[in-house]
Image: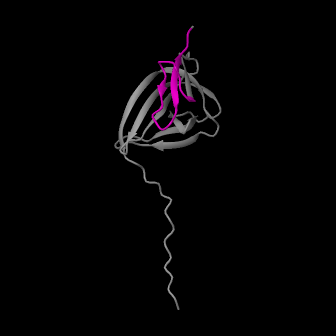
Amino acid sequence: MSSIAVAPAASRARVRTPIKSRALIWRGGPIAIKIPEGAKRGFYSEEGKESVAFLQFVRYVKGGVVNIYLHNPEESVAGRTIKATAELWQKTLQDGRSFFYVNLKQQPSDVDETHRLEILPGKCDDPAAFETPPPLVGYVLFRELTV
């Protein structure tokens, strides 16, 4: 009789890299933005604070995505175009990787938009554009609308 050792199945649990810092890059708006039907609903909480609901969706750039979070969304926003103020943040992890994400806060529908959000792959010659941190190749631009 032989004894065969069986290795345990590899764990699929994802270990998150600790966050080193977050920096606000841009704040403004309002913008008009369509919330996709498939936006993912979630919650986050900070120690000692109340949980915050959000909808998460992405815009693709070369090599990855820029995450967009709509905080405290109304129940029926999926599939609709809403008005929101916007913040562009850069998150840096302990291992040196860095990413952009956009936080949105919904505004009344009768508010006039002042900017248009563009998140696109490639390079942009506009000096107001924010290039995504490497290895991603893309940019985030809050284009001011003129009257």
Q: In the figure, 53 relative to 129: above or below?
A: below
Residue 106 placed where, x, y %? 52, 27
Q: Is residue 89 left or right of residue 20?
A: right
- First to last magenta residue range: 120-146
Q: 110 or 88, which is in the foreground? A: 88
Position of the C terminus by quadrant: top right
Residue 41, picture quadrant: top right
The image shows a total of numbered marks equal to 0
Q: Residue at x 43, y 24 (%)?
A: 26
Residue at the outermost bottom position: 1
Q: How is the image coloured?
A: one colour
Residue 134 within the segment the image draws in magenta? yes
Query: Which residue: 51% across, 59% down?
Result: 12
Residue 74 at x, y percent in the picture: 56, 33
In front: 34, or 20? 20
Q: Is residue 67 magenta?
A: no
Name of the residue lying farthest toward the top: 147
Question: Taking 122 as reference, is 43 above or below it?
Answer: below
| Whether residue 130 is situated above or below residue 60 in the rendered picture | above
The one nearer the camera, 110 or 140, is 140
- The residue closer to the viewer here, 54 or 122, is 122
x, y percent for residue 130: 47, 25
Q: Position of residue 82 (x, y in %)?
A: 59, 26
